[in-house]
Image (tube, grey):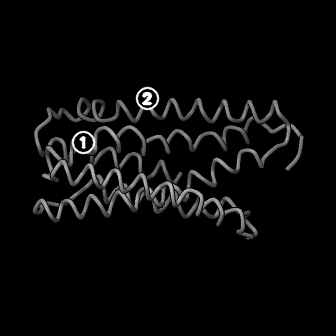
Amino acid sequence: MSTAKLSYRSKIAYALPAFSLAVVGIPVYVYLPKFYTDVIGVPMTALGVILLAVRVFDAVTDPWIGGLSDRTRLPFGRRRPFILAGSILTAGAMLFLFNPPEGSPFFSTVWFCTGMFALFLFWTMVTVPYESLGPEMTFDYNERTALFALRDGFLIAGTLAAASAPAIAGGLLGLFGGESDERHTFFWISVVYAPLLVA
């Protein structure tokens, strides 16, 4: 770590992933539960319990992953291996979760539960080391402020894009909200965002 000024390229390289990481926010919390209850057939009570359990699980995994990345010593650094592996696994979990097969309510509930726990574990593998990497890039107060402002700007832009993704996908593909249309919408969202998460 140093007090040297960061190049604009370094700041963009650090901030850009925040755009695609935003997809785990709005679509997963707002659109996906409705999709799983209304289209896939997961009972609402079961879905609520799973979402609560995932948040409790997240409270345990956040400090655990943070501690692991603090203690990791590799040639690529202690944060980057987690970010790389986590992004690939998060993309896989997203494809899994956004594309459930036909099945009974019990099967669909197990699918949703498995996908949510996997998604949030792997997302933690990315976000905790990613957010820890920023302060390690420079000691300079102004440089840190500029770096985090850029990162948060990309995060807000990503959140807006993710929030409008179902409507955009539906409009572009001419989908009108039927069961198969909902499946197609989430399929295309996952196909677009999974590579972005890795990139």
Q: Who's the residue at 52% across and 55% down the image? A: 124
Residue at 26 percent across and 49 percent down: it is: 48
Q: Cα distance, mark 1 to mark 2?
A: 17 Å
Left or right side of 8 for 97: left
Specify the amino acid type for callout 1.
Thr
Q: Residue 119 lies in what quarter of the image? A: bottom left
Q: From this view, report whether residue 39 is shown above or below residue 85.
A: above
Neighbour class for label 1 at 10 Å: few (<14), some, many (≥20)?
Answer: many
Residue occupying the point 42% across, 41% down = 25
Q: Which residue is mark 2?
A: 160
Looking at the picture, tell me which residue is in the foreground, 192 or 186: 186
Residue at mark 1: 185
Taking the spot 66% from the left edge, 43% from the top edge, the residue there is 13
Secondary structure beneath disc 1? helix
Mark 1 and mark 2 in contact? Answer it, CB < 8 Å.
no
Residue 107 picture location, percent across and down: 16, 65
x and y, in percent, of residue 182 in the image: 18, 42
